[in-house]
Image: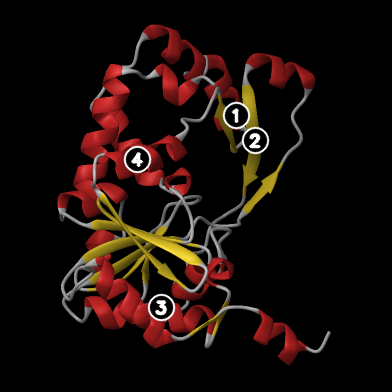
Amino acid sequence: MDIEIRMKKKTHVTKDDIINGLKTLGLKEGHRVGVHSSLSSFGYVEGGADAVIDALLEVVGKEGTVVMPTYSNNVDHLEKTQEEKDMGITWKYRISPYDPKKHGCWTGKIPDTFWRRKGAIRNSDPTHSLTAIGANAEKLSQSWKTLLEADGYILLLGITTSCCSSLHLAEERVQLPQHILDRITPPPEIEEKYAKENIGFGYGPYPKFGKMEEISIKHGIMKRVKIGKATVKLLRLRELIDLYAEYLQKNPDMFYFD
């Protein structure tokens, strides 16, 4: 099929469509916003990832800030042995030296375009860097916690809260019960062994952040709008973290067990 015909079959989205959608959601000049995204969720975007980035920067203006996860691809995923699986290891990778001006990211086309922009500030975390453009970009690129302290927002472009890694901030407020801690806390000897070998790893079940989608809608803290084929959502990060901490305190099992 000819590429022009394929494009016509897709929903066509322009930069102005994105700007209008973001403004309808309530995103404004001066806002500080962390963005998780799927470019393909829109359909066909005229101008691609750059059009989405331009729209975001135009809406928040010079006094606002856009932050994106630019989790780097300087890692080689390693096969787990059966023994490691039995121990509770869920994934592991070898970390190569990280260069924030060289290594791409695996978090999508939009953030992988974003960190290459002039004026973008990318932090030095070797695997989970954030990149920011705008006012106080250097500070806000340091961690999701700085975005929370700045009363920032989270914008989900065509994806769900399952990708919202800032939700880990709620875990600092809650004392999880021992039966969950036993499942998610690796023995010291495993941490020591992998640290010596410069290997990153996951241990135990990862919290099911996607469950906060329905909860956020129920409590009225998530605004939604359709842009092309994508459902785009905006939440105040403070409200999202407060709500997750509340639910995590009341019923932590729902996020760690099926």
Q: Earlier in the sequence, mark 2 or mark 4?
A: 2
Residue at disc 4, secondary structure: helix
Number of marks in the rendered image: 4
Q: Are marks 2 and 3 in contact (CB under 8 Å)?
A: no
Tell me the quarter of the picture where residue 4 sits.
bottom right
Which residue does the image show at 35% across and 10% down from the upper left? 177
CA separation in Å, label 4 and label 3: 23 Å
Q: Earlier in the sequence, mark 4 or mark 3?
A: 3
Who is closer to the viewer here, 107 or 228? 228
Which residue does the image show at 17% across and 76% down from the upper left? 29
Mark 4 Cα-neighbour bin, 10 Å: few <14, some 14–19, many ≥20: many
Q: Are marks 2 and 1 in contact (CB under 8 Å)?
A: yes
Q: Which residue is mark 4?
A: 167
The quarter of the picture where the C terminus appears is top right
**Residue 120 placed where, x, y %?**
36, 75
Q: Are marks 4 and 1 in contact (CB under 8 Å)?
A: no
Who is closer to the viewer here, 123 or 203? 203
Query: Which amino acid, mark 2?
Result: Lys
Q: Which residue is mark 1?
A: 194
Q: Earlier in the sequence, mark 4 or mark 1?
A: 4
Q: Which mark is residue 53?
A: 3
**Residue 233 placed where, x, y %?**
36, 58
CA separation in Å, label 3 and label 1: 38 Å
Query: Which amino acid, mark 1?
Result: Tyr
Residue at disc 3, secondary structure: helix
Query: Which amino acid, mark 3?
Result: Ile
Q: Which mark is residue 92?
A: 2
Asked if residue 29 lies left or right of residue 119, the reply is left
CA separation in Å, label 4 and label 1: 26 Å
Residue at disc 1, secondary structure: helix
